[in-house]
Image: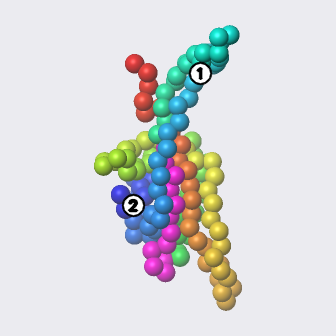
Amino acid sequence: MSYIKLNGREFDADVAISAYSRNFNVLDGDNAGRVMTGRMIRDIIGTYVGHKIKVFRRGGNYAGLDEFWAYLVEHSVDDSVMLEAADGQTTISYEAYYTSGTQDIESVSNGVNYWGEIEINFIPMEAQVVPK
């Protein structure tokens, strides 16, 4: 995958991926915990597969990077976004949310701020794998 697709919008022409990782978290319900013998009792809700993406500008396209940042900030108050991301040798699409993003300033020249990579962590709204 060489693009970022959010809500059906492809950012391939504006930014490129410099780091891409997938993660999963298994969430338990209220009935999970240790019993007197020390054995763990699980109350599995499901497994949530998410993605952490770091993007950078293509060439000297600072405007494209700024536009991606503005898009993320604008949609940060939405309940969720639709993310399409690489998963294995195919793609996965899921409804996700994010609660923060980071970007460091690279330099300031002639009154212009040049910003570096953007890192964002997408968290699934629903479990993709649930107990049978």
Mark 1: amino acid: Gly
Compute the Cα span from label 2 to label 1: 35 Å
Q: Which mark is residue 29?
A: 1
* Residue 20 in the image, given as x and y percentages of width and height: 46, 56
Q: Callout 1 environment at 10 Å: few (<14), some (14 to 19), or many (20+)? A: few
Its colouring scheme is rainbow
Q: Which residue is mark 2?
A: 3
Label 1: element kind: loop
Q: Nearer the viewer, residue 50 or 21?
A: 21
- Does 132 lie within the magenta span? no
* Magenta region: 50-61
- Relative image position of residue 94 (x, y in whole percent): 43, 41
Please, is residue 10 above or below residue 22 in the view? below
Q: Is residue 76 above or below residue 123?
A: below
Q: Taken as a whole, is the magenta stretch helix, strand or loop?
A: strand
For the N terminus, the image quarter is: bottom left
Please name the amino acid that badge 2 sits on: Tyr
Residue 59 included in the magenta stretch of the image: yes
Determine the residue positioned at 46% across, 68% down.
15
Query: Eyeballing the image, is 25 above or below 118?
Result: above
Residue 43, x across and y down, in percent: 55, 18
Rendered-image quadrant of the C terminus: top left
Which of the marked residues, 2 or 1, is nearer the chain's N terminus? 2
Q: Residue at x 65, y 68 (%)?
A: 104
Q: Is residue 127 above or below residue 123?
A: above
